[in-house]
Amino acid sequence: MVRRFWLLALPACLAVLPTAAQAAEWQAVEKVKTYAVSGTTGIELYTSIGERGPLIGGKVRTVAHTDFKLTWIRDYVPQDGGCTLVSARPKLIITYTLPKPSQHLPEPIAKKWETFYAGIRDHEKVHGDQIREMVETILSATVGFSVPDDPKCKKIREEIKKPLSAASLAQRQKSRDFDRVEMGKGGNIEQLILRLVNP
C-alpha cells in the first residue's frame, strides 16, 4: 500500500574563459508552493497526498516536486571577425511544491508530520542544489565562448546550444540517479513514509 503512492519528482572553435566574478553575481530565487492534505493520522495524510499531490506529466502524482524557470541576459560581442559571449547573467526561480495539512494535527502525529515534512523538503532542496550546479556549469562553459567568422553573432547562438543541452541532460540524469537511491528499497523516502504511516 505504501508503494502505491511513492511519488517524488520528478534539463566550431570554442575558447572558454570563465570568470569567478560571473558566478558570484547571481542568486537563485526560491519559492514554496503548498497543496492541502487532510487527515489526522499518518495513513490518512499519506492517502491524501496520493489523491492530491502534484501531477507529473499529467499522469503520476508526487509527494513533492521541484521545478524551475531559467532565463538569461547575454552579451555577445563581435571580435576579430568572430563573436564572443563576453557575459551572461542568469535569472533562476526554483519552486518547491510541498504538502501541508489543512487542519491542526494532534500529538503525536504533529511531531511525526514535522519529521516527514522536513525530510521531504530536504530531499527537494537537493534537487534545487543540482539545478544551481547546472547553471554554474553553463556559466563556466559559455562565458568566453567564441565562434570564428561570425561578425553578426548569429552562428554563436546556435553553437551555444550544445553546452546548454549537455548541462541540462547531465542535471536530469543526476536528479534521476538521486531519486533512484532515495526512493529505492530501504532508502530515505521509504523510511520517511514508514515512520509517518506506522502506528
Image (cartoon, grey):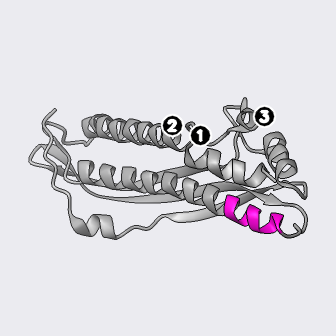
Q: Main secondary structure of the magenta part?
A: helix
Whether pointer 1 and pointer 2 mark residues with C-beta atoms closer than 8 Å, the reply is: no
Q: Which residue is situated farthest in the left direction here? A: 80
Left or right of 110 in this view: 78: left
| Sequence-first tag of 1 and 2 | 1
Residue 81: assigned label: none
Which amino acid, mark 3? Met
Q: Amino acid at mark 1?
A: Leu
Question: Where is the C terminus found, in terms of image quarters?
Answer: bottom right
Indicate which disc, 3 or 1, sits on the residue closer to the N terminus: 3
Which residue is painted at 76% across and 45% down in the image?
Answer: 53
Mark 3 or 1, closer to the camera? 3
Up-down relation of residue 76 to residue 122 (above or below): above
Give x and y (percent) for residue 149. 14, 36
Residue hosting label 1: 10
- The residue indicated by pointer 2 is 180
Is residue 51 shown to the viewer in this render?
yes
Residue 1 image label: 3
